[in-house]
């Protein structure tokens, strides 16, 4: 094996799967990034800038969940931007440094005996020294009518991201875990009125958060589920149903945040790397998974805060770790 520094590609002689015949000059990427959310594209920037052969694979549109955010106002030095614009700018930045993107999904990942990773993507075999997993997660939805229609139009899944748009307005949070209570408390410092809608008569959040909630001005709507979302062009309220007596209540709102958990898109690697019980990938502080040379960044990994900026930080960290891995395995 030798390393071509000009192109950042290792050129090796491999054996194919049929009778041990030689496959001469097979190219092996330095880094293949699966997914192009902010973590993946930042990894693309850092990989390209380090003169590593870097390929991003994306089965949908680049940007991940970020593109569904109509306004982003908490990304440093960009007080006024939106998800699509930031996604396009990140991709252009990665391409500037030589990273490439191919719009195809990955069907499988296999670690070969020498540590090389073999990916099957769109019927093509792709070889790489390291893999960065950036497939993200999807918010768990209510599963009711108008939910998709009003996403970004009064309905959201990240109060920390979008709560600032509801200053001095009336909002509600649906959920009963730590995230839901944290969102409600955060919004209580911004909004004029906050409801916390929970389907049970007790919360799953930790006791400290429950104490803080009890001391706040948040109104908890107990034993209730959201039956209907109201509005024409944007969300204007919800109808809740009390599970104890089936009574209905109409709550007028400017915004609704759904915080009933997320679904990590980790199925591709659920038998390859270690996951926590919720399906998020377990990593160390360098974003290293349980498999050497495979890293995870952004919302797909276990972490306390899922934001554009924390995903971007993960991308930089993972490439730094991947570069050290590559240098140590030449």
Image: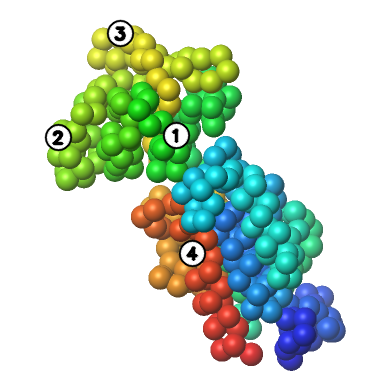
Residue corresponding to mark 2:
215
Identify the disc placed on residue 311.
none
| 117 over 15 or under it: above or below | above
* Separation of residues labelled 3 and 4 (CA atoms): 47 Å
Count the marks: 4
Upstream in the sequence, badge 2 or badge 4? 2
Q: Nearer the viewer, residue 244 or 195?
A: 195
For the point 69% across and 47% down, the residue is 60
Q: For the residue labelled by badge 2, is the local secondary structure a helix, a strand or a loop?
A: loop
Residue corresponding to mark 1:
165
Q: Where residue 251 sits: x, y (%)?
A: 36, 15
Upstream in the sequence, badge 2 or badge 3? 2
Residue corresponding to mark 4:
313
Q: How is the image coloured?
A: rainbow
Upstream in the sequence, badge 2 or badge 1? 1
Residue corresponding to mark 3:
247
Locate the N terminus by quadrant. Answer: bottom right
* Separation of residues labelled 2 and 4 (CA atoms): 35 Å
* Separation of residues labelled 2 and 3 (CA atoms): 27 Å
* Separation of residues labelled 1 and 3 (CA atoms): 31 Å
Q: Residues within 10 Å of mark 2 (few under 14, many from 20)?
A: few
Upstream in the sequence, badge 4 or badge 1? 1
Nearer the camera: disc 4 or disc 1 = 1
For the point 36% across and 55% down, the residue is 304
Q: Where residue 84 sits: x, y (%)?
A: 64, 45
For the point 82% across and 75% down, the residue is 18
Q: Nearer the viewer, residue 178 or 112?
A: 178
Decide if residue 29 is on the left or right side of residue 144: right
């Amino acid at each position: 094996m030798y390393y071509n520094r000009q192109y950042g590609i290792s050129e090796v002689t491999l054996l194919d799967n049929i009778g041990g015949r030689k496959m001469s000059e097979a190219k092996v990427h330095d880094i293949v990034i699966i997914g192009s959310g902010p973590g993946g594209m930042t990894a693309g920037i850092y990989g390209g800038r380090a003169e590593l052969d870097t390929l991003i694979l994306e089965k949908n549109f680049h940007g991940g969940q970020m593109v569904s955010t109509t306004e982003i106002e908490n990304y440093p030095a960009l007080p006024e931007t939106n998800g699509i614009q930031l996604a396009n700018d990140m991709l252009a930045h990665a391409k500037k440094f030589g990273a490439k993107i191919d719009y195809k999904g990955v069907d499988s990942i296999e670690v070969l005996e020498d540590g090389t990773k073999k990916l099957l993507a769109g019927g093509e075999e792709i070889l790489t020294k390291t893999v960065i997993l950036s497939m993200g997660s999807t918010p768990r939805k209510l599963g009711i009518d108008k939910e998709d229609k009003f996403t970004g139009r009064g309905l959201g899944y990240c109060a920390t991201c979008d709560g600032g748009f509801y200053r001095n307005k009336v909002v509600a949070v649906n959920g009963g875990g730590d995230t839901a209570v944290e969102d409600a408390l955060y919004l209580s410092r911004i909004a004029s009125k906050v409801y916390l809608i929970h389907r049970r008569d007790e919360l799953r959040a930790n006791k400290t958060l429950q104490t803080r909630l009890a001391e706040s001005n948040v109104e908890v709507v107990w034993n209730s589920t959201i039956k209907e979302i109201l509005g024409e062009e944007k969300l204007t309220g919800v109808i809740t149903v009390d599970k104890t007596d089936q009574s209905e209540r109409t709550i007028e709102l400017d915004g609704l945040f759904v915080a009933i958990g997320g679904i990590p898109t980790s199925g591709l690697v659920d038998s390859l790397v270690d996951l926590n019980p919720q399906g998020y990938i377990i990593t160390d502080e360098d974003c290293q998974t349980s498999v050497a040379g495979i890293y995870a960044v952004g919302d797909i990994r276990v972490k306390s805060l899922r934001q554009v900026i924390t995903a971007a930080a993960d991308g930089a960290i993972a490439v730094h770790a991947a570069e050290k891995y590559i240098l140590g395995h030449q």
